[in-house]
Image: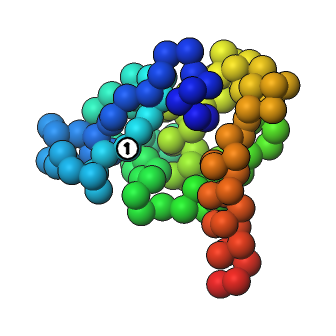
Amino acid sequence: MHEQDTAFGCAVDHIISLKHGGATDADTLAYACVFCNRFKGSDIGSIIWQTREFTRFYNPRHDRWSTHFQLQTATIQPLTNIGEVTARILGFNDSDRLLERHLLINHNKYPHPAALKRIEEELDRDDKE
């Protein structure tokens, strides 16, 4: 979601928090909506309860979005364990967030053209590999 389309804006977030040894430089920071930032806190992953396996969160600096998620209208569908824990803990598909995305879809603002272009480029690269 584009910053201009959020009611509360975005914030710079440590992908791996300082308390876990993360650094403060361009490669270790991400621009996140306030809700994702708040829900993530200093967490670095979560548990897949079926297997009791700890799984790290999606890292926007190293992971391909299209490997771990698929956009289905307003829902961000996880495709992997990394996608599952990230979507669950960050609340990607909570009812308020889905409502917000549906409203933006109705105004042709979601997905943002820049985000859609990145998703399509990743899918094109995946098809070529």
Report whether 85 appears left or right of 128. left
Q: Residue at x 48, y 22 (%)?
A: 9
Note whether 96 is above or below 42 in the view shown: above
Is residue 106 visible in the rendered image? The answer is: yes
Total marks placed: 1
Name the residue type under label 1. Answer: Ala
For label 1, the residue is 30
Position in image of residue 27 (x %, y %): 29, 56
Note whether 105 is above or below 56 in the view shown: above
Position in image of residue 97 (x %, y %): 65, 22
Position in image of residue 93 (x %, y %): 66, 29
Report whether 8 appears left or right of 121. left
Report whether 29 appears left or right of 121. left
Q: Residue at x 58, y 34 (%)?
A: 2
Query: In terms of depth relative to the viewer, which is nearer, 30 or 52?
Result: 30
Position in image of residue 92 (x %, y %): 60, 32
Q: Residues within 10 Å of mark 1 (few under 14, many from 20)?
A: some
Q: Residue at x 42, y 63 (%)?
A: 62
Query: In terms of depth relative to the viewer, which is nearer, 65 or 5?
Result: 5
Q: Residue at x 15, y 37 (%)?
A: 19
- Quadrant containing the C terminus is bottom right
Q: Secondary structure at mark 1?
A: strand
Is residue 79 visible in the rendered image? The answer is: no
